[in-house]
Image (tube, rainbow, N blue to C red):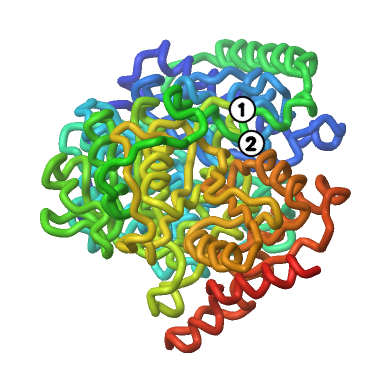
Amino acid sequence: MKNTEIPEIFSIKKTPKDILVQWYRLMTIGRKIDDRAPNYLKQAIGWSYHAPFAGHDGIQLAIGQTFEKQKDHLFPYYRDMLTALSAGMTPEELILNGISKATDPGTGGRHMSNHFSKPEWNIHNTSSLTGNHTLHAVGVARAIKYYGDKVVSISSQGESSVSEGYVYEAINGADREKLPVIFVFQDNGYGISVPKKDQTANRKVANNFIGFKNIRVIHCNGKDVFDSMNAMAEAKKIAIEESVPVIVQANCVRLHSHSNSDKHELYRSETERTYVMEYDPLAKFKRLLLRYNRLTQEEIDAIDEEATLIVKTAHKAALKAPDPDPAKIHEFVLPEPYVSEKYPEGIHTDQGEKKKLITALNETLKAEFRHNPDTFIWGQDIAHKDKGGIFNVSKGLQKEFGKKRVFNAPIAEDFIMGTANGMSRYDEKIRIVVEGAEFADYFWPAMEQYVDSSHDYWRSNGKFTPNVTIRLASGGYIGGGLYHSQNIEGSLAAIPGVRIVYPSFADDAAGLLRTAMRSRGMTVFMEPKALYQDPKASTPIPEDFEVPFGKARIRREGSDLTIVTYGNTTLMCLDAAEKLAAEGYDVEVIDLRSIVPLDKDLILSSVKKTNKALVVHEDKVHGGFGGEVASIIMEEAFEWLDSPVKRVGSTFTPVGFNRILEAAILPSTAKIYNAAVELLNY
């Protein structure tokens, strides 16, 4: 890492007057909105969250002026009001966001106030998860480098965000991949009420990354317009010309409380509060303009009056804007998926060679990589000419498609997920597959990014959705024990905005994976790893097979009992049904294939025919997805039931390593058979 000297491009003497006027106008308008924002809450108009930028004026002006709309990519954080204004957003747009109007260009009133965005300009909508957009900026920078554009990705954030582990992952990844991304640390010395000394041992947080090989570091005075402009100009030049990440450490002051829900009088002395006011960047800039005779007092007064009028006009227009329509809350939860014309029900009649489930996945991945040259895959341990992941699902991909499309990621699940979100922002044509973790049990560190990504489409009012398929090897029956044999789909299914599919047979695995990779939006693709090589899961597979989301499949027709299942237990349910058939019972087995969306119609029609229902899955009964299925049956088919809905699943314990313990914990054919007999005899 090198500390970079900043060449002087901008100065009070050399900068053209028209630019100085533009800067002063932006800073003045921004400050007037910043000062006015708390009044909206007092008047019950809105802006219930406002983090004032006053004291960050220099660096925020510079970020916005450096950003080139529709070329560069900007990821602002919740304090970046002046950044957004300087980048080209209008005062009215800022106020529309603040008071959560339907015409807010970034979110339509769906997201927290003070989160400014304009996706069509590449001013990205970010969540309130501190610093998580750093990973998105890195993902975009990866695409910038791959496609050879001479632009940059900019992540703007407070210095305390650097305490987050995923911020370290982002910077480490950008350094390793040598990506054109600028990380701006707006350092005001506080994380809400927590002083910097309680966050890090280094006085300047950028020095936490002093051992990194490729990153360049620029220190600047974030209170000073010219120092900030020079720093950002140099950072952009380095990032583009050398294709390396740059950290800009901008020292700022926070003139006011962290936000309108904070009272800095409780933890900052009157002396300190008075002291920081003396470093007001706007007041300093005004003094410089007058001292060096670049503007007269009359010219400054005229700009101040103009700014007042602009803000007043924007205020009146924003108040007249429509509020969000509560009838539209279900819009933009999930984008419309790819629709199969040839296989609308996800069923085929191919009687050719049977293929294993692992072969189905491998061949479908390769076929889709050929189909769309803008498809990428990464994850842990997946990219080697002779190996493809711990189970070899991606074997041969890197050999055929190269290291730029198929590559390993660090052991950092948040990084894997977050950069997938970011890279997909670059272009709608991009499709990304990630092995979210080597085993589904290890996916939990990525949940921050998963949750954030799950509501991107809804939060952005339909303007952005991550086009990402998340592969997860799931389930037990391999003697894996903790972190190798658990099921997590029940927890994931509680989070809206992501499809979840769980095939049991090779043909469905191929068809669902193809549909996932061709669809817009996020899909979790759960792979029953115990069935990868199982001959019982092998089937013939048409080359172009596709399975629609939300279409369950009747694996065995019957009239006495409906068994609803998916994943590893589907084969067990079929075995149990055959055993029962020998005893004179006719059992119908429904393989859900898709958990979200769920084929509720097929489940209900089957139960209305058989009048009894057994829900079976490998996951724990307690809190498992079967509880949702059982509730739907009870609520919507109660009058057709001749017995209670029964469930079979794992015990409410972790899955043990010893095979004896595993067998006691997980479902089995015998356990399913016994539960079915109990229902049939009810």
Please state which of residues 668 and 310 is positioned toward the viewer in this rendering: 668
Query: Looking at the picture, which amino acid does disc 2 mark?
Result: Asn
Q: Nearer the viewer, mark 2 or mark 1?
A: 1
Residue 535 in the image: state x and y as whole percent.
Answer: 32, 61
- Judged from the image, the secondary structure of the residue bearing numbered disc 2 is loop
- Judged from the image, the secondary structure of the residue bearing numbered disc 1 is loop
Residue 28 falls left or right of residue 19: right
Quadrant in which the N terminus appears: bottom left
Residue 592 in the image: above or below residue 625? above
Quadrant in which the C terminus appears: bottom right
Residue 60 falls left or right of residue 397: right
Residue 3 is at least partly visible in this image: no
Residue 331 falls left or right of residue 148: right
Residue 333 in the image: state x and y as whole percent.
Answer: 62, 35
Residue located at (62% from left, 30% from top): 332
Residue 645 is at least partly visible in this image: yes
Q: How many marks?
A: 2
Residue located at (79% from left, 28% from top): 326
Tag 1: Cα neighbours inside 10 Å, few (<14), some, or many (≥20)? many
Please state which of residues 147 and 612 is positioned toward the viewer in this rendering: 612
Residue located at (65% from left, 50% from top): 258
- Alpha carbon distance from label 2 to label 1: 16 Å
Residue 283 in the image: state x and y as whole percent.
Answer: 56, 33
User: Any mark on residue 114, and which?
Assistant: 2
Query: Looking at the picture, which amino acid does disc 1 mark?
Result: Asn
Residue 589 in the image: state x and y as whole percent.
Answer: 59, 54
Residue 192 in the image: above or below residue 659? above
Q: Earlier in the sequence, mark 2 or mark 1?
A: 2
User: Any mark on residue 461, and which?
Assistant: 1
Tag 2: Cα neighbours inside 10 Å, few (<14), some, or many (≥20)? many
Residue located at (78% from left, 24% from top): 325
Residue 71 in the image: above or below residue 614? above
